[in-house]
Structure formats: structure tokens, C-alpha cells
Image (cartoon, grey):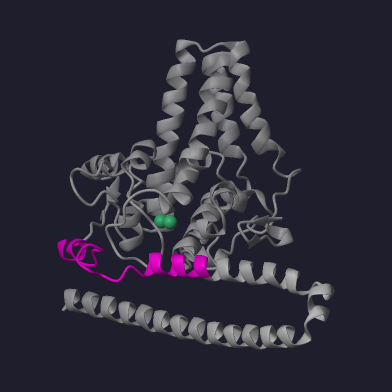
């Protein structure tokens, strides 16, 4: 199937039978019309949605994927188990894949780049066979803990625990509305950070990807909407860089640090916050690359369409001279295009390397 000229490899297509639970849970939400919504179920819904959102953003994302603060081993397990209740697989799978997203943002190797289509970046990448497993090498620092390996291997334990708990407390309405409905909304709110936060919003910093800042997504995800800030300076536990950038995950972490449960919360240095702004003229390579790739794909589409027409033998035989000339021009354009493509790719690689070197230099200057 083509989607705006995007070809999908077989292992990148949705595995429908393996994805039955995912779609089934969406359907089960409708049972709320049968069970009704009790007050207990509503409270469970709110606790389950915001509580698990915190474990995903502060735990799976900012701690396991980015190590932006420190935890003792007991608290580390609490974060891991809380995150696993979200039915978003285990901590090592989640954080390992997320590290890969940052390493290869918006390139061919990015697991969920919206450059490969919105649906793909939202859920397609999770429902296909390609990303079923994770690479323990990419998350060696946490894979050494047996309890985290166990939780990742048995990633059904967390969601079942949450589901049974909701049923015990709130009956059928607690299960349907408190657990299933909050789980579905939690899924899509989390997925929006991968899909919409690379499409909608503003870019403050010139990064090599297409990440954006969006207040709406920040409200839905307890502060994950400041995604351009985050791509720009991933080491920070705080994603809203300024007081007006709503970031409740960080506020809670800050609170936990006062009672000693959380340590070494990393913040972006003032110097870093002030640098690299698009409006100050920093070269916005991420957007340039995205537009360039789109333009290249559009030209390729036009050419392949044009070749279909040209292959028509009636057209070719009617005027062989014209056909030869067209072939020559075609070849000439193709050569020029390839040379231009190479030229731009080289220039981008050099600019990217220069950026890396100057960032390293800045870090060294900060240490000295
Ligand atoms: Zn991240
Ligand atoms: Zn991203």
C-alpha cells in the first residue's frame, strides 16, 4: 500500500491478529453504556489516567530513557511497575525504543517518524512485527537489574494488576470506565507525543529533527508537549524550560526531591536555554531536511508516473526522434538531480558535524 508515496515493508505492516487485544480494548470502552459510570469509577478513571501518565512521563521517559535524575533501587522499581500498568509494554522495551528515536530522529532509522506518515508514527510502529523485541545493548544500564528484565518479559502483570484492582474497588463500572477507558485515552495521549508533537506547534530551537512545542499536548501529557525543548536538551528532567511552560511531571518530581525520594534533577543551563533559537537565526536543519525529503519524494512520484506514460509503445513508435531526445533529457535531469542530492547531503552532514563539535566544545567550556 502506498501512503503519499511511502512504501511499507512487510514487517512494517499491522499484524492484525497480534493486535486484537489493542482493538478489543477500544471496543470494550463502549460497555460503559451498559455498566454506567459510578462515582467510584469516575474517581478510578482520574487516578488511573493521571497516575499512570506520571509513571510514563516521569518514569519510563525521563528516568529510564533519559536518566535525567537519580532514584534508589526501590523507587526505581515503583516507577517501572507504575509505568508497566499503562499497558505500553515493559520499561526496557519502552525506554530502549525511545532512545533509538532520539538517536535517529526523523531519519530512516527513526522508529516512529511522522515523515513515514501520521498513522505510522502514532500506532503503526507498535502494531507491526518490526519493533516487537528490544535490543538489550541499547539499554544495558538498566537491563542489568533482574527485576526490570522480569517486568519487561512479563509485561502483562502490571495491566492485569491495575485491571483487577479497579474491578475489586469499583465493580464492572470500575473495570470498564476506570480501567479500560482511561487506558485507551492514556495510549492516545502518549502516542500524540510521537505523532502530533512532531507536526503541530512551534519550534523554538533549531534541532536536527521536526519536534515542536505545544501547550495543548503539554496539558494532556503532564508536560511532555514541550517536545522541541526536549529534543534540544534531552538530559533535562524539566521539559517546560520557563515558568509559563506547564510541566506537572516536573513539579511532582521536584516535590519528591524535597522528601529525598528523587535526587539530582537535571535542569537546562541558562546559557543553553538562550542559544540555538530559530528566531535568532540558527539554521533550522530539521525542517530543512524534512522539506527536502518531501520535495525529493514528490519529484520521484512525478517521474515514475511520467515513465508509465512514456512506456506506452504507441507514443514511442509514432516519433522515434522525439523519444530519443526525451530519453536524453531525462537522463540529464536524473544526473543533475543525483549530483544536487549528493551535494545537499554532504553539506547537511558537514553542518551536523559542525553542530556536534561546537556542542562538545561548549560542554567542555562549561566543565573548565
Ligand atoms: Zn525523549
Ligand atoms: Zn520526538
Q: Where does the C terminus fall, quadrant-wise? A: bottom left
306 or 95, which lies in front?
A: 306
Is 36 situated above or below 219?
above
Residue 288 drawn in magenta:
yes
Q: Where does the N terminus fall, quadrant-wise? A: bottom right
- Decide if residue 282 is on the left or right side of residue 87: left
192 or 44, which lies in front?
A: 192
- Decide if residue 201 is on the left or right side of residue 182: left
In the rendered image, residue 16, in percent from the top left (x then y), is placed at: 74, 44
Is 110 situated above or below 216?
below
- Decide if residue 146 is on the left or right side of residue 45: right
Region of the chain picked out in magenta, as a range: 269-295
In the rendered image, residue 23, in percent from the top left (x then y), is placed at: 66, 35
Q: Residue at x 19, y 66 (%)?
A: 280
For residue 236, which quarter of the picture?
bottom left
Q: Residue at x 52, y 87 (%)?
A: 339
| Quadrant of picture, ligand 1 | bottom left
Q: Residue at x 20, y 61 (%)?
A: 273
Residue 208 drawn in magenta:
no
Amino acid at each position: 500500500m502506498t501512503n503519499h508515496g511511502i512504501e511499507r515493508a512487510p514487517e512494517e505492516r499491522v499484524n492484525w491478529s497480534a493486535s486484537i487485544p489493542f482493538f478489543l480494548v477500544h471496543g470494550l470502552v463502549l460497555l460503559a453504556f451498559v455498566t454506567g459510570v459510578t462515582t467510584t469509577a469516575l474517581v478510578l478513571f482520574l487516578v488511573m489516567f493521571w497516575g499512570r501518565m506520571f509513571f510514563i512521563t516521569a518514569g519510563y521517559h525521563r528516568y529510564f530513557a533519559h536518566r535525567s535524575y537519580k532514584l534508589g533501587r526501590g523507587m526505581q522499581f515503583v516507577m517501572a511497575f507504575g509505568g508497566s500498568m499503562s499497558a505500553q509494554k515493559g520499561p526496557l522495551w519502552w525506554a530502549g525504543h525511545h532512545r533509538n528515536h532520539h538517536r535517529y530522529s526523523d531519519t530512516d532509522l527513526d522508529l516512529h517518524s511522522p515523515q513515514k506518515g501520521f498513522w505510522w508514527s502514532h500506532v503503526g510502529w507498535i502494531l507491526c512485527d518490526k519493533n516487537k523485541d528490544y535490543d538489550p545493548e541499547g539499554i544495558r544500564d538498566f537491563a542489568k537489574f533482574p527485576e526490570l528484565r522480569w517486568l519487561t518479559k512479563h509485561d502483562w502483570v502490571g495491566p492485569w494488576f491495575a485491571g483487577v484492582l479497579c474491578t475489586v474497588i469499583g465493580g464492572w463500572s470500575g473495570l470498564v470506565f476506570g480501567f479500560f477507558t482511561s487506558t485507551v485515552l492514556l495510549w492516545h495521549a502518549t502516542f500524540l507525543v510521537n505523532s502530533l508533537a512532531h507536526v503541530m506547534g512551534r519550534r523554538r530551537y533549531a534541532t536536527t529533527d521536526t519536534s515542536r512545542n505545544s501547550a495543548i499536548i503539554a496539558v494532556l501529557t503532564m508536560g511532555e508537549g514541550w517536545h522541541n525543548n526536549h529534543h534540544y536538551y534531552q538530559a533535562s528532567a524539566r521539559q517546560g524550560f520557563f515558568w509559563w511552560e506547564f510541566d506537572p511531571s516536573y513539579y511532582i518530581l521536584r516535590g519528591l526531591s524535597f522528601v529525598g525520594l528523587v535526587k539530582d534533577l537535571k535542569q537546562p543551563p541558562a546559557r543553553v536555554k538562550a542559544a540555538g533559537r530559530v528566531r535568532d537565526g540558527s539554521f533550522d536543519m530539521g525542517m530543512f531536511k524534512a522539506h527536502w525529503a518531501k520535495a525529493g519524494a514528490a519529484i520521484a512520484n512525478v517521474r515514475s508516473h511520467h515513465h508509465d506514460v512514456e512506456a506506452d509503445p504507441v507514443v514511442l513508435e509514432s516519433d522515434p526522434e522525439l523519444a530519443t531526445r526525451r530519453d536524453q533529457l531525462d537522463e540529464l535531469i536524473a544526473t543533475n538531480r543525483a549530483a544536487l542530492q549528493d551535494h545537499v547531503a554532504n553539506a547537511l552532514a558537514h553542518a551536523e558535524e559542525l553542530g556536534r563539535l561546537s556542542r562538545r566544545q561548549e560542554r567542555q567550556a562549561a566543565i573548565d
